[in-house]
Amino acid sequence: MIAFLDYGAGNVRSVINGIESLGEKVKVVETAEDILSAERLVFPGVGAFGSMMQILNEKKYVEPLKSYLQSGRPFLGICLGLQALFEGSEEAPGVKGLGFIPGMVRRFDINLSVPHIGWNGLNFKQPSRIFAGVRGDEKFYFVHSYHVVPTDDGAVLTTTNYEREFVSSIQIGNIIATQFHPEKSGSAGLQILKNFLDTSVEQGRPVRDSKSTRLAKRIIACLDVRATDQGDLVVTKGDQYDVREKGAVRNLGKPVELARRYYQEGADEITFLNITGFRDFPLEDMPMLEVLRQTSENVFVPLTIGGGIRDYIDKKGREYRALEVASEYFRSGADKVSIGSDAVLIVEEYLQTGRKTGRSSIEEISRVYGNQAVVISIDPKRVYVQSTDAVRHQVIETAIPGPNGERYCWYQCTIKGGREGRDLDAVTLAQVCEQLGAGEILLNCIDRDGTNLGFDLELVNAVSDGVSIPVIASSGAGNAEHFYEVFTGTEAESALAAGIFHRREVPIGDVKNYLKDKVEVRL
Ligand code: 1PR
């Protein structure tokens, strides 16, 4: 039996699913006594340092945790569960951590995108039983803006490079904690979880030891989900956002089955977009929650869900906050939520008033779950103009002239699945969303969607040059070379595709094999 500390933030279901998939039983901690009497304790943390410590204090878990750690019984901290062991964090000045390890948690002060999101490697500093069966060249999933800085190196188990070298796991006796998420790191992560759970495992040191590690470019499989006219929930695929063929919604398969297939084939992440979310409210129309629950049972890579994340008033006048919708998605197994239409409306209001309200979905969700949990999904389309000053939007010079030979264009934001164009450009949208707390941009392109013509590199460059958060390039992938083009021709951190994967035209493995000697990828 594993005692499991769920203090109520973020996606802990995946950790429980990971442990249960290894044949162990989990008991969720409900009282301080449960901590004191635990034989093995897992503490996954998601969200922000300050709110985590506040909840641990309110629940009176701090002293029991300290005494559990002093007892030397097995402890596995994940992400914030690592950071909690330190004295404090720059994320919440003045808030005390558990102080088990001398040192502080610091924000990344680097030129690369922050948060550090994605699959990166480990430099091994000590042997450990959690490394039994680990080769050494595997990659693990990270998502964080802060990293631990111990006062001395004695406890450092691994480091990872992200512009600078930082501590990615620690071990003191039976106390082990990782900045990466083993439960989101595919089979390599499950191996580490398994080694932690089985205390009889012998110490291991990976065969291959690296001197430095590199963040991999991510390949993301996207599942656009909606109900057919008969009411079946299916994965569909648009052609420039038109998902109907001869009047019927295209049906490319079942969401849970396809997600499992992509996990097996090596997808680094899976995104579900409930494409009719703008009219069906997710908490009234629950199948997406069930899709997530079932998927997270045996898909151990990050899951993002979008569609319908906004404030809502139902027919009885009951008001729902976007935060409640997001919380339900996180509890059901999502790691990140993506916000589409609502982000456009929030930015329009912000540009009109010049004020942050603190109550928008972006601000509320990022405050509680952290910036890394909030993705902005943009659905832009090109509007050609004759000159840079023809409109008050951010205009680019384009190598693909318009129908009348125009050499300039801007990217118009749309809402409601591309149905309604707004007076706002994609670069401004991304920039304001970053200021409001978004952690990543999912950059679709209506002109390229479903065309197999390749990503719109000009769009990707315009947006990624304008923000410092990671950008996912989306729409138009037709072959493996298109991924190479987007990774070498732009700063995109990841690339997403749908049609070529659904139709088995180019399997994910082929994309990675094509890229492997040219671009850093997780194999
Ligand atoms: O506005 O917050 O409710 O979110 C709705 C979400 O649904 C948004 O993220 C929006 O992008 C998405 N969406 C709405 N309508 C459509 C549609 O296709 N009719 N899908 C839609 C967006 C675009 C990509 C697609 C890539 C790759 N789909 O996600 O998967 O273009 O496709 P490809 O590789 O086949 O070219 P809200």
Image (tube, grey):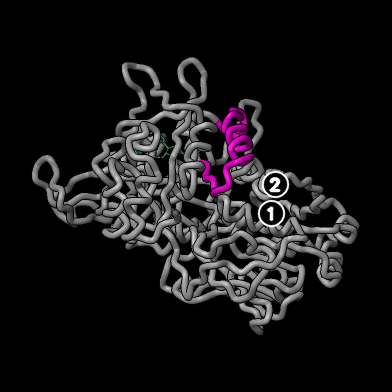
Q: Residue at x 59, y 72 (%)?
A: 158
Which residue is identified by label 2? 22
Badge 1 marks a residue whose secondary structure is helix
Three-letter amino acid code at the position of disc 1: Lys
| Residue 269 painted magenta | no
Q: Position of residue 361 (x, y in %)?
A: 55, 48
Three-letter amino acid code at the position of disc 2: Leu
Give 72 or 27, whichever is nearer the viewer: 72
Q: Are marks 2 and 1 in contact (CB under 8 Å)?
A: yes
Give 99 or 242, whichever is nearer the viewer: 99
Which residue is identified by label 1? 194
For the residues marked 2 and 1, what is the alpha-carbon distance in whole angstroms? 7 Å
Classify 10 Å Cα crowding around label 1: few (below 14), some (14-19), many (20 and above). Answer: many
Q: Which residues are magenta?
A: 281-305
Position above or below: 70 against 132: below
Residue 465 left/right relative to 38: left
Q: Residue at x 81, y 60 (%)?
A: 58
